[in-house]
Image (cartoon, rainbow, N blue to C red):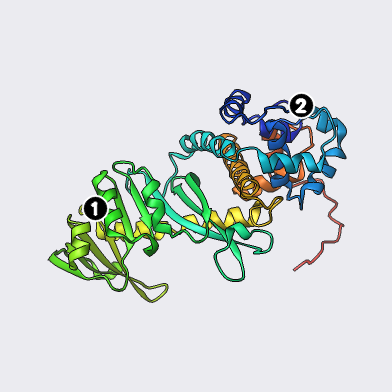
Amino acid sequence: MNSGRFVLSQVLDLIHRQTLDRLVERYDAESRVRHFGCRQQFICMAFAQLTWREGLRDIADCLNARPHARYHLGFREPIAKSTLADANEQRDWRLWEDLAKSLMAKARPLYAGEEIGLDIENTIYALDSTTIDLSLTLFPWANFRKTKSGIKMHTQIDLRGPIPTCILVSNARQHDVLWLDDLFFEPGAFYLMDRGYMDFKRLHLIAESGAFFVTRAKDNLRFSRQRSQPVDMQTGLRSDQIGKPARTKAREDFPLLLRKVRYFDAETGRDLVFLTNNLLVPALTIATLYRLRWRIELFFRWIKGHLRIKHYYGTSPNAVKTQIWIAVCVYLMVAIIHKQLELPGTLHRTLQLLSVHPFEKSPLHKLLTEPESRTSTSLNSNQLTLWNL
């Protein structure tokens, strides 16, 4: 990361050439390719994410306008819009999924020591999904309503640092709970889920794996109480009961003991009922854990607000998934840089600075570190001040 290299080049150093070469070989992604390989494709798409390009022509024009920078980024010929479009349409999107997973493995240890405000050592995951609306005319393969199409981004994040650990991109028709069938559950970890994942048979699989779940109960829950535990009403807790599902089918699907915690949220004025298979942690911890689940909503808001995953450069399933996974890669690269350089402020600040200086030749730590505020002692005391209150 020396001062003689472009900021964009320093960011791209996080993608190891050997890792990308292995993935290219695994998916045979560069057969009969002469000059526009997967690395060049990734550079174009990462540049588009960092700088919010409007389309393929915009990407090509901006990079071609800087021939010296383009050459040092690894392009031996001008970039053609059609070449980039073909790469996004034809190269297997799973290559970028695997690349994102390698970045997840690199980012998670950096954030492992993050505080979450609870005295608990277990790994805590939050699960949720977000739907991205699409045009039915342009994306007929993703139809889920009469007048629109859409895709769903199922995500699991580690709450110690806003790092996704697992993502599935599916048609918006797929119900959230079906994703649980594909997940591996880590023994001892907590999984925080909303009512969309409420299925006793699948919750039993989580419990059998040695993991714990915290979810909200549906309104039609029938619960057979075996015993109650004392609670401090001043904390918002209303009850803490241990028992089993009352309905025969639910009890067959979940034959283990189940804990039901009722909590009054003074901020919203709502009574909330939580279910968990952890019988030992304090009841207030269960309510607090579920409150932390909303951090995944902040992750979705960040991704949608600061990266290009609602406006697509291609219309095929492969092109859409390619763009989403490269957007995730860019998010992870920003998160890694932010933590490695111990930068001040938020991830958004880091992304903003990278977005406006991609072709500046400056060390990343110098560009991204906030300068110390200094009060000048040599100002002319006769200088008028604006808005002098």
The circle on residue 34 is 2
Q: Describe residue 29's horizontal placement relative to residue 126 as left or right.
A: right
Task: Compare marks 1 and 2 and give the one earlier in the sequence.
Answer: 2
Quadrant of the rendered image containing residue 44? top right
- Using residue 225 as the reference point, say whether residue 155 is left or right of it: right
What residue is rendered at 17% in x and 56% in y?
255
Residue 31 visible (yes or no)? yes
Nearer to us in this view, 284 or 219: 219
Horizontal and vertical percent position of residue 338: 59, 40
Q: Secondary structure at mark 2?
A: loop
Distance (Cα) linking label 1 and label 2: 57 Å
Residue extending farthest to the top is 18
When the figure is inspected, residue 35 is found, relative to residue 64, above or below; the finding is: above
User: 1 or 299, which is in the foreground?
Assistant: 299
Query: Which quadrant of the figure contains the C terminus?
Result: bottom right
Residue under pointer 1: 278
